[in-house]
Amino acid sequence: MAFPEDVLTEDEHVVLHLHPHWKALIRPIGVLVLAIAAVVVGVLMLPQSGGGSIALAVIGAIALVAVLWFGLWPFLVWRTTHYLFTNERVLLQHGVFSRDRRDLPLTRVNDHSMSQRFIERLVGCGTLTIESAGERGQSVLVDVPGVSRVQTTLYELIEAQHDKHSLGDGEMRDILADMREGKPLRDPTS
């Protein structure tokens, strides 16, 4: 399930597209392995007749429910959670059946920080908190893979966006000189 490109503006391009860290899949894989092991043990150990068949059906049903609930569902949640960093904004999207998306324009990001617990440092992930101007305030991205690299990239994107929308020293001097000479203001982007 790739992120749809049609949500991007004309001049916007994707810099990073991430899902939560693979550690979110450890439990679903463990549940799948345990469910398969329970069914195999049931087939090998239970008698083929009468009560053994019923017990095997019960074990199979419980294994199926466990795989769907604790295996497939967390996988789908992981797969449909997107952390998208573009040259203009950060898009956060999640949802299996319904979809929630939050756009954070880079020009509105006030602060960003990252934290890693010991285990997260070992597996290479962490939590990235982005604070933006507006009523929603903070956005917390959990289990971000390579979180320190992502935070550095976010900083670079914010600085590039700031530089794009601000005047340099030379441009400001030219505008002030034109104003002193009474010349009409010109568009500094042209």
Image (cartoon, rainbow, N blue to C red):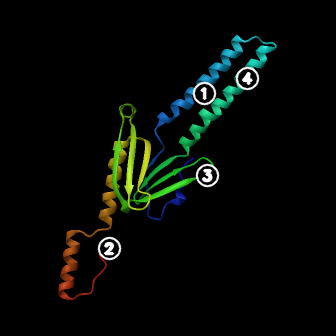
* Callout 1: SS: helix
Whichever of callouts 4 and 3 sits on the residue coming sooner in the sequence is: 4
The residues tagged by marks 2 and 3 sit, at their Cα atoms, a distance apart of 42 Å
> Residue 189, labelled with which disc?
2
Whichever of callouts 2 and 3 sits on the residue coming sooner in the sequence is: 3
> In the picture, residue 143 is in which quadrant?
top left
Label 1 sits on what residue type?
Leu
Depth check, front residue: 151 or 137: 137
The residue positioned 72% from the left and 12% from the top of the image is 46
Whichever of callouts 2 and 4 sits on the residue coming sooner in the sequence is: 4
The residue positioned 40% from the left and 32% from the top of the image is 123
Residue 141 is situated, as x and y percent measured from the top left of the image, at 43, 46
Label 4 sits on what residue type?
Val
> Residue 98, labelled with which disc?
3
Whichever of callouts 3 and 1 sits on the residue coming sooner in the sequence is: 1
Task: From the image, tell me which residue sits under label 1.
Answer: 32
> Residue 58, labelled with which disc?
4
Tell me the crowding category of disc 1: few under 14, some 14 to 19, or many 20 or more residues within 10 angstroms, Cα based: some
The residues tagged by marks 2 and 1 sit, at their Cα atoms, a distance apart of 58 Å
The residue positioned 64% from the left and 23% from the top of the image is 36
Depth check, front residue: 57 or 150: 57
Which quadrant does the C terminus fall into? bottom left
The residues tagged by marks 2 and 4 sit, at their Cα atoms, a distance apart of 71 Å
Q: Do the residues under discs 3 and 1 have CB atoms within 8 angstroms?
A: no
> Residue 41, labelled with which disc?
none
